[in-house]
């Protein structure tokens, strides 16, 4: 959804997929490629940072509980730094991350985004704008927007477990299930 919005706002979109060692890597990679193809973008670049799986989390370690150990410290900062490094190398002037409202973890807040922007400016010596086009929307809003833009939700993958069928337990599943259960998903406008 974020890529569609960015393109709608006149940005050139160069998709980047980050493998941080997540359990859902293969399914996320497949979904990323399918979504990009569906909306007419180039295949995403795949950046392998899979060694990050050594940081204990239920998102990267199948022996840890996916709910109790859901926080992966530094994950969003890793995404931002990797995206900015890639943007720097391609002379892009902006990067985007798909944070939504109702933050659960400290690296999902507006304050975090402001601090991350300052960190990027200092680390790179140039300004690469950090965009968060979905930060004012909750999961229901993003799903409704996806439907409005005719993005087939069946192309997306949202479960942190990496299994064929969503686990229904992880935070991402719970958000998606709650958003769909509220009945706010409208048919196409």
Image (cartoon, rainbow, N blue to C red):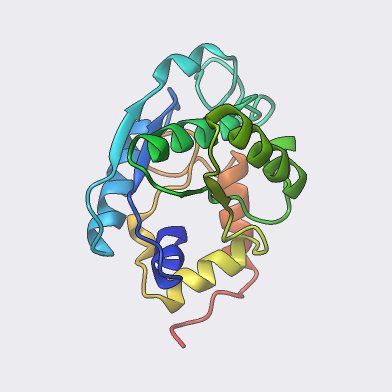
38 with respect to 159 (left or right) = left
* Residue visible at 26% across and 53% down in the picture: 34
Q: Nearer the viewer, residue 53 or 124?
A: 124
Rendered image quadrant of residue 122: top right
Above or below, 103 against 19 in this view is below
180 with respect to 105 (left or right) = left
Q: Residue furthest top?
A: 54
Regarding residue 163, the answer to whether it shows in the image is no
Q: Nearer the viewer, residue 85 or 75?
A: 85
Regarding residue 110, the answer to whether it shows in the image is yes
Q: Quadrant of the N terminus?
A: bottom left
* Residue visible at 28% across and 43% down in the picture: 30
Above or below, 10 against 24 in this view is below
On the image, the x and y values in percent for residue 119 come to: 65, 32
Rendered image quadrant of residue 118: top right
On the image, the x and y values in percent for residue 55 come to: 57, 14
Q: Residue furthest front?
A: 125
48 with respect to 133 (left or right) = left
On the image, the x and y values in percent for residue 9 come to: 46, 70
On the image, the x and y values in percent for residue 104 come to: 73, 42
Above or below, 80 against 78 in this view is below
The count of marks equals 0
Q: Nearer the viewer, residue 126 or 38?
A: 126
Above or below, 133 against 173 in this view is below
């Amino acid at each position: 959804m974020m890529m569609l919005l960015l393109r709608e706002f006149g940005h050139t979109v160069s998709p980047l997929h980050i493998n941080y060692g997540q359990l859902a890597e293969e399914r996320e990679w497949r979904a990323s490629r399918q979504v990009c193809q569906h909306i007419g973008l180039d295949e995403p670049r795949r950046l392998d940072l899979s060694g990050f799986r050594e940081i204990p989390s239920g998102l990267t370690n199948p022996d840890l509980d996916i709910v109790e150990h859901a926080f992966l410290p530094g994950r969003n900062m890793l995404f931002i730094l990797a995206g900015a490094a890639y943007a720097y190398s391609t002379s892009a002037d902006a990067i985007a991350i798909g944070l939504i409202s109702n933050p659960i973890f400290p690296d999902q807040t507006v304050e975090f985004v402001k601090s991350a922007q300052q960190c990027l400016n200092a680390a790179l010596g140039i300004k690469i704008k950090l965009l968060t086009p979905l930060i004012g929307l909750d999961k229901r809003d993003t799903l409704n927007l996806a439907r409005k833009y005719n993005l087939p939700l069946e192309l997306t993958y949202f479960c942190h477990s990496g299994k064929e069928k969503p686990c229904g337990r992880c935070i991402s599943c719970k958000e998606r299930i709650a958003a769909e259960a509220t009945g706010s998903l409208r048919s196409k406008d």
